[in-house]
Amino acid sequence: MEKGFLDKVEDNATVQTWSETTQQEKGDSLVEGYKLKEIWDQWNDEVKQLFYSSYGDPPYLLDVKVDKHLFRVLTQFWNPAYSCFTFGRVDLVPTVEEYMALLYCSKIQVDKAYSKAANVPTLLKKLMNITGMSEQWVAARIKQKGDSKCSLWKNLKDLILAHLDTRKKVDVFVLSIYGLVVFPKALGHVDEAVTDLFDRLDKGITPVPKILAETFRSLNECRRAGEEIVAIPRQDDISKEKWMAILQNL
């Protein structure tokens, strides 16, 4: 049993290599998350209450200390066939109810799940509505990134810091949380698909099923990468004792 566990630990080095490469090439901007936290900490209680009343608790995500070693070892216990973590004879799975509790918002209607509409406004129109800026200003800041259009985080950050309309400042901030922390795709950019989801938050839709589905997709991808990439030597700072301590404290 112990040998099997150690084999899984060594396999995590492949997941680490893959995840860090993917972060640089495709997304997962934790650095931008820290910059969002700095902006949030500078806001007064009035602005924060406006955020909570409109969008709920996503800012708490900025305080989460991500233990990357824990996630690497958890990936090895993810069962893609049943979409759950399997520890011996015990199965654990993230649930809609748990995610609803984490992202609590009184305006969210649990029976109105997000799905992409057949006819949606263009990215230009959506960003004009969200930011309150002119068509020329928005058009100059839309970039093509891979197979989709995006907004550069640097431009959104500057707008958050300088915008005179508090409501628009909050709107752009929550768009950035969803684009950089919840659904990161292109490093330092907010993807058009996230803009579409945000555009419908004020209609009471819940993003939770979408976030849960993205969790499953990401775990499946990590698990697949761990199985396909050739193993490399395990890092010295990830000891057997550290992995055991993490698992014992789940």
Image (tube, rainbow, N blue to C red):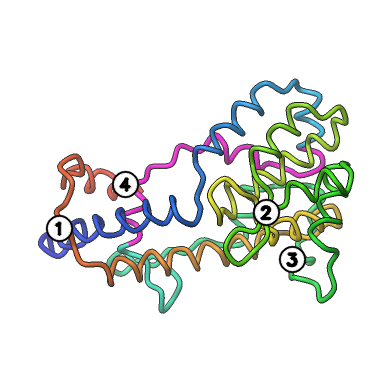
Q: Earlier in the sequence, mark 1 or mark 2?
A: 1
Q: How many marks?
A: 4
Callout 1 secondary element: helix
Disc 3/disc 1 C-alpha distance (Å): 41 Å
**Residue at point 86%, 49% (across, down):** 128
Between residue 89 and residue 19, name the one nearer to us.
Answer: 19
Q: Which residue is mark 1?
A: 6
In the rendered structure, which segment of residues is drawn in magenta?
Answer: 52-75
Above-or-below relation of 141 to 37: below
**Residue at point 83%, 57% (across, down):** 204
**Residue at point 36%, 46% (across, down):** 68
Above-or-below relation of 51 to 122: above
Q: Earlier in the sequence, mark 3 or mark 4?
A: 4
- Estimate how packed mark 2 is, as few (under 14), some (14 to 19) or many (20 or more) residues with alpha carbons within 10 Å: some
Q: Earlier in the sequence, mark 4 or mark 2?
A: 4
Q: Which residue is mark 3?
A: 114
In reply to whether residue 59 is colored magenta, the answer given is yes
Q: Amino acid at mark 1?
A: Leu
Disc 3/disc 4 C-alpha distance (Å): 32 Å
Q: Which residue is mark 2?
A: 143
